[in-house]
Image (cartoon, grey):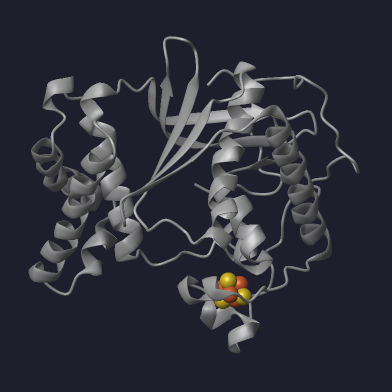
Amino acid sequence: MSEVPGDASEHGGPSLSPSRAADFMTCPLLYRFRVIDRLPEPPSPAAARGTLVHAVLERLFDEPASGRTPAAARTLLAPQWERLATAEPRMHELFGDDAERLAWLDEAARMLDRYFTLEDPSRIEPSHREMSVRALLASGLTLRGYIDRLDIAPTGEIRIVDYKTGTAPREEYEARALFQMKFYAVVLWRTLGTVPRLLQLIYLGNGEIVRYSPDEADLLATERKINALWQAIARAQASGDWRPHQSKLCDWCSYQALCPVFGGTPPPLPTMEGPVPTLPESPEPPHPATEATAV
Ligand code: SF4
């Protein structure tokens, strides 16, 4: 999914997802390539495995509680792979031969086994899975995205759960991982009027869980950060200055050949129709937000 500056959201204004926000924080040029130029990226085995494992975990909860076993999860792998490969035939290009594909599937199966060492899904009844969320901030910016799983306790306490097929980040990158979860917490807070009790990142690459309990001050700070980020994006679009930011994450960037840091030349900026999106200079949202969209 991509969000475009000036992209007509349901409310007719700009919108932002946590992935694209993270792109801009990583590197404004990366954001430009993905959102403004919309340059396609080749599928990667790691990203495809993430999609597959997410699909299996989503469907695992269709089973009755007693049927949510490691064997059931493994049984879901092959049909979900077929479904994804039918929807995206380029997935077949990821593997040189069947042995490679089977090794890749085996790693996905090990991640699913690891999931069961971290949670007992027979004791969980998710309220929502792959939930589309959206909230309009007082600044005029719409936040949107998908939450892997939302658990709501009988007492009304909310837990946001996100599955990661990588390994838990080192401490210095943990805040970055939590930003996505806080972003979703802001959306739910502004939508439901309740601060989620727990944000839970489940790392299936190494079998770790990161938990965080936000408070209202946290979410206000996150909302301010998101609005400031959007202002920076709008400024970059107005000026055309999408400067690259070199970091370790460049190793995973699909666009190195077009990046000046690596000797490349970005293509000319596409002509954008319509006015450059703007935000108030100092957005300070009132409480609660002026509008909350049902999720
Ligand atoms: S290679 Fe690095 S600096 Fe260049 S666009 Fe990608 S992330 Fe940005």
Residue 119, x across and y down, in percent: 28, 35
In the rendered image, which quarter is residue 271 located in?
Answer: bottom right
- Quick one: which residue is furthest to the right in this view? 281
Q: In this view, does 267 lie to the left or right of 156?
A: right
For the residue pair 162 and 76, the one nearer the viewer reads as 162
Residue sitting at x 74%, y 48%: 230
Q: Is residue 111 left or right of residue 289?
A: left
For the residue pair 257 and 17, the one nearer the viewer reads as 17
Residue 107, compared with residue 157, is above or below; it is: below
Residue sitting at x 72%, y 56%: 272
Q: Is residue 244 left or right of residue 250?
A: right
Residue sitting at x 17%, y 75%: 96
Indicate the quadrant of ligand 1 in the picture.
bottom right
In the rendered image, which quarter is residue 200 located in?
Answer: top left
Q: In this view, does 54 lie to the left or right of 159?
A: left
Residue 206, x across and y down, in percent: 31, 56
For the residue pair 141 and 117, the one nearer the viewer reads as 117
Residue 256, x across and y down, in percent: 53, 79
- Quick one: which residue is furthest to the top in this view? 154
Residue 113, x across and y down, in percent: 18, 47
Residue 234, compared with residue 44, is above or below; it is: above
Q: Can residue 132 be seen in this view?
A: yes
Residue 70, compared with residue 121, is above or below; it is: below
Residue sitting at x 49%, y 47%: 1
- Quick one: which residue is furthest to the bottom in this view? 263
Tally of numbered tags = 0
Residue 50, compared with residue 30, is above or below; it is: above
Q: Is residue 10 visible?
A: no
